[in-house]
Image (spheres, rainbow, N blue to C red):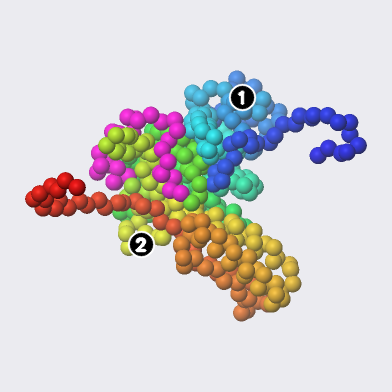
Amino acid sequence: MYDIRDVPAVKYHELDSNPAWTGEGSQIPIFIGTTGMELGKDEDGSVISTETGITIRKFKNYANACKTKQNGGIGTKTEGNLLLTVLKDFFKESAKKESGDVGVSYVYVIDVGSAGITESDGRATWLKAMDLAKSKRDVELEVYVGLNTESTYKDTKNTDVVALMESAYTSILTDSEDGSPRIAYFTLENATDEQLIAITNDSKGDGKFIQHSRIGLIEPTCYGRSIARICVTPYYEEPGYEQFRTIDEGIFNKRTPEEEKKLQEAGVIFIRDELTRKSVFTRLNLAVSTAFSKDEENRPNDCLIHARRNTDHLIREMYDIAFTQLKRNETDIMLKHLQTDVNTLVDKEIKLGNMMTGTQAFVNESDSNPYTLTIDCNAVPVNSSLAIGFGVYVSDPVVKILDK
C-alpha cells in the first residue's frame, strides 16, 4: 500500500503465490515425508544451525524445493529423496497448459528426515509432523510420502502402516471440529497390487486394516501426479473426470479388467487408460476412499472422495457463517439472520448443481444449554455418472424406399 505523500513511482514486490495458478476448486496440499537426510543436516552432511527439528516449508514451484536445505529447499537430488521425487511429479502435473486450467499456487512440506515407523522415535517424528500440519488452515489434504514395503512389511498384518494411517485419521477428525476437514492420502513405495489390497482387507481376521472415508490409498507409480490431479480438480467434480496433463498413453494399460476391479473394490486409487473408438484417455480410474472396501451393505455414503470433498466444502462454508454468530446476542432476529444465511448457502450449492434437493440445514437452540446453538445439516452431494447403459434395437427392414 502506497501513501499519496510518496513520490510517484512504480515499485516491485514479491508475491507470496502465483496468481496465474489459482482457480476455483483447487486445493492446497501439505506433504509429509522422508528426504533420506538426517534432520539438522544437509545433503553433504554439514550441520544446519537454523534447523533444530521438523518445520513447515512453503514452495511455489519445484525450483524452490530443489535447493539445499541450507538455502531453504529439501535437497537437490531426487535419488533417495522420495519427498523431492514426489514434488517434482506434482509440480509437473499441476502446471497449467491452457489459460483456463486450474493450478495450485503453492504447497506446504514437512520433512521428517529419514524417520521410519517401525521404531518409537521414528513414529514420534511422524506424529509430531501430523500435529504441526494442522497449523496451516488453508490445507485441505495431507499427503504422506516415504512408507515402503521394505521397512513396513514385517508380515501380512501391515501393523505399522495401518497404525500410522489410523493416527492420521484420528488427527483429522479432531481438527475437523475447528471447521477444517481434510483427507489424508498414502502410498507404499514399490508395493504390488496385492500388497495395497492387503492394507484394506478385513477378511484376514487380524483387525489390521484401514477402511475410512477420509483415508485414500493410491498406487505408488506417479503418486505425485495423482495427488496433483486431485488438487486441480474442483471439489464438485470426480477427480477421474479429466485426463492427466503429463502422462502419455500406454503406461497404465497393463492390468486386466479383473485386476482393475479388484483394486477398485479394495478402495485403491489407480490410473488407467480409458479407451474410446478413436481416442485414449489416461485418467484416475475412480477416486475411492479406503471405506469403499467395505461390503456393499456397510459401505458409507461418503466412501467416494467426490462426495466427501463436496460435503467438506459445504462444511467449511457453513462453519464460517456460524462463526459470525459466536458471542453475538442470541435474539430471535439474530437467529433468523443466521438461518437465512445458512439457507442462502445451501440454495446456492443446489443451484450450482453441486448439492441435490434434500440438502437442508436447521438452526436450533439447545434444549439443555442456554448458551449453545446447533446447526443440523443433511448434505446430499450430487452424483457422478459411473456407469452408462447403451442399448440399440435393430428394427425390421423397410420394404420400399420412397424418393421424396
* Residue farthest left in this picture: 399
Quadrant in the rendering for residue 155 = top left
Residue indicated by mark 1:
67
Dot 2 alpha-carbon crowd within 10 angstroms: few under 14, some 14 to 19, many 20 or more: few
Q: Residue at 53% x, 38% y: name it.
A: 100
Q: Sequence order check: which comes first, mark 2 or mark 1?
A: 1
Label 2 amino acid? Asn
Residue indicated by mark 2:
298
Can residue 319 be seen here? The reply is: yes
Label 1 amino acid? Lys
Nearer the observer, 268 or 239: 239
State the extent of the magenta-drawn residues as a range: 237-263
Nearer the observer, 241 or 251: 241
Q: CA distance from mark 2 to mark 1?
A: 48 Å
**Image coordinates for residue 300, horizontal then vertical, percent:** 40, 60
151 vs 336: above or below:
above
**Image coordinates for residue 147, horizontal then vertical, percent:** 46, 38
Residue 254, numbered label: none
- Numbered disc 2: secondary structure: loop
Dot 1 alpha-carbon crowd within 10 angstroms: few under 14, some 14 to 19, many 20 or more: some
State yes or no: residue 38 in magenta.
Answer: no
**Image coordinates for residue 374, horizontal then vertical, percent:** 60, 71
* Residue farthest top in this picture: 44
Q: Quadrant of the N terminus?
A: top right
State yes or no: residue 250 in magenta.
Answer: yes
- Numbered disc 1: secondary structure: loop
Q: Residue at 29% x, 42% y: name it.
A: 260
Can residue 154 be seen here? The reply is: no
Q: Residue at 59% x, 46% y: name it.
A: 139
Q: Main secondary structure of the magenta part?
A: loop
